[in-house]
Image: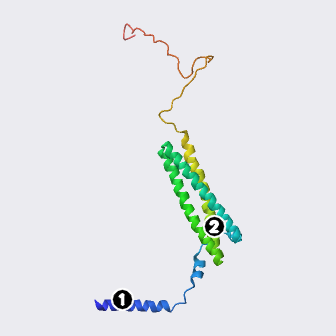
Amino acid sequence: MTSQWRALCGALVLAGTVAFSQAPATPASALARATAPTAPSDAEDVPDTEKLRRVTDALARMRGVFQDTQLRLEEARRTRDVVKLNCVNDKLTQVKALLRISEQADATLQEAIAKREALTASHAFTKVTIARQKVEQLRGQAGACIGELAFRTDEALSVEVEEPDDLFGGDPTTPLAPPPLTLREPAASPTL
């Protein structure tokens, strides 16, 4: 068993020697730039002060959508409609997650601008821009959750119909009684 351990340790030492004899590792910032997704060209063209202003505006709008969606959730709770409640709650959860991502991206953006890392700043700006667009879509979907289900009726609903006096031919919703049946006598002979 000790010979197996010695062979394993020898293999590890050999692997380590080969690894250290390779080319030197790239610095962390160069590695981050190489693996970071490329930002759209329009994000790179926006000045840093404008990025900060747009992100602040986007966060304010997303917080407003979050509050609106919370109000719709409370409305669904008051009506005790489980379908509405589940639908709006799903949209609220998605808005909350996108808001959290955007707040983290805002912090990353501010840090990247302070460190003058243009690619990281553009990436964080793009994250917030995409999240804002998705939150706006979710606002519409949350409204649809409440609106499209408003056409449902409950069992306590009653409808009262007033029949006009001058209705020609009577009420079309109540059919006329069929004419009385006339019974024929059976034939005297079954062969006829």
Q: Amino acid at mark 1?
A: Leu
Q: Residue at x 53, y 55 (%)?
A: 92
Q: Are marks 1 and 2 in contact (CB under 8 Å)?
A: no
Image quarter hosting the N terminus: bottom left
Q: Which quadrant would residue 151 be assigned to in this image?
A: top right
Q: Which quadrant would residue 116 be assigned to in this image?
A: bottom right
- Report the front residue among 87 and 182: 87
Q: Which quadrant would residue 39 be assigned to in this image?
A: bottom right
* 3D distance between C-alphas at marks 1 and 2: 49 Å
Image spot of residue 186 (x, y percent): 39, 9
Q: Residue at x 65, y 71 (%)?
A: 122
Q: Is residue 38 visible?
A: no
Q: Secondary structure at mark 1?
A: helix
- Report the front residue among 177 and 32: 32
Q: Is residue 102 visible?
A: yes
Q: Residue at x 61, y 58 (%)?
A: 62
Image spot of residue 102 (x, y percent): 59, 64
Image spot of residue 88 (x, y percent): 53, 50
Closer to the N terminus: mark 1 or mark 2? Answer: 1
Which of discs 1 and 2 lies nearer the camera? The answer is: 2
Mark sitting on residue 48? none
**Which residue position is annotated with label 2?**
126
- Report the front residue among 96 and 2: 96
| 172 lies above or below 43 | above
> Dot 1, crowdedness within 10 Å: few (<14), some or many (≥20)?
few
**Which residue position is annotated with label 1?**
8
| 116 lies above or below 82 | below
Image spot of residue 82 (x, y percent): 47, 46
Image quarter hosting the C terminus: top left
Q: Is residue 162 left or right of residue 192?
A: right
Q: Amino acid at mark 2?
A: Thr
Name, please, the residue furthest toward the left: 1
